[in-house]
Image: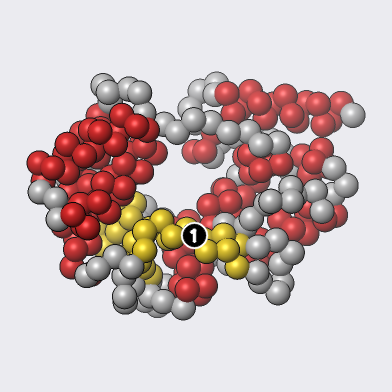
Amino acid sequence: MILREDYRHSASRGNAFIDSPAYWIITELFEYSEPANARMVMGTVAEEVAYEAIGLDLSKEQISDRVNKTWDKHYDDDTVDEREWAKEIAVTFTDNLRQFGKVISYQNEKVIKHDRLQKKIKCITDFEFDDVIVDTKATAYLKRLKSGKLDANWYPKQSDIRQQLLYKRIYNKPTMLFYASAKDHEAIDMIDRVSNVDLMQVFQTIEYICTVAKTKEDVVRMFPLTMDNFRWGKGHTAAKEFAIDIWNKAWKN
């Protein structure tokens, strides 16, 4: 198998493969990576500060101060809107997660072996409580209908549902999603929800492809280079330039 020795299946990698096999190829087989952007840092900081705020019972003003300090550790641009959004989101996370009681674990990593897979599965949960695992999602805004209900075409995202159903299966514990923007929030449970794609089958597909292929370039030649998914960014990005070079080289051989 051409997957690297330390490769671990995960919900994020499985979702990346579903969204864009080409993007999965450059990141997982050719190890392309990009620095975190402000929107990603917003979520990381809001979650991290919320965890501290719950444990230390911090006030809104203290949470805001913590966000500033934590942001500076993760990101060197202090002019973006996301820093201010992170403050409001951290407060929303804190106020709503407190109702679940004591946090048993935060950003807890579990690696398991599955009998149908050669590679292990890695799971990292956000907030685990006695009765539920809550995955927090920071976002710029929540799209709602005129009735006030969340637009079902946008939320919950299928990728998020797939992740939480995987965790529900592995941890044998109820899971839920908590979306928050600076001005809005919504909690969504996984009761009676089903995924449109089974991540376990996706993991098997990845292994099958990487077993049949003799080289990374063989995998490249199995998929067209389509770059219209959101993961590629807008305009001429570094990821697109990297991928074009990989595909051109693979087809020249």
Label 1, on which residue? Answer: 109
Q: Quadrant of residue 25?
A: top right
Q: Is residue 188 above or below residue 140?
A: below
Residue shown at the point (25%, 68%) measured from the top left? 102
| Residue sitting nearer the eye, 92 or 7 | 7
| Residue sitting nearer the eye, 17 or 99 | 99
Q: Determine whether the residue tagged by mark 1 lies in a helix, strand or loop.
A: strand
Dot 1 alpha-carbon crowd within 10 angstroms: few under 14, some 14 to 19, many 20 or more = few
Residue 33, position in %: x, y? 58, 33
| Residue sitting nearer the eye, 205 or 12 | 12
Residue shown at the point (26%, 46%) measured from the top left? 49
User: Is 96 on the left or on the right of 196, as rendered?
Assistant: left
Q: Is residue 227 visible?
A: yes
Q: Quadrant of residue 130?
A: bottom left
Residue 145, position in %: x, y? 23, 53
User: Is 122 on the left or on the right of 156, as rendered?
Assistant: right
Residue shown at the point (70%, 36%) measured from the top left? 30
Q: Is residue 221 visible?
A: no
Q: Is residue 238 above or below residue 20?
A: above
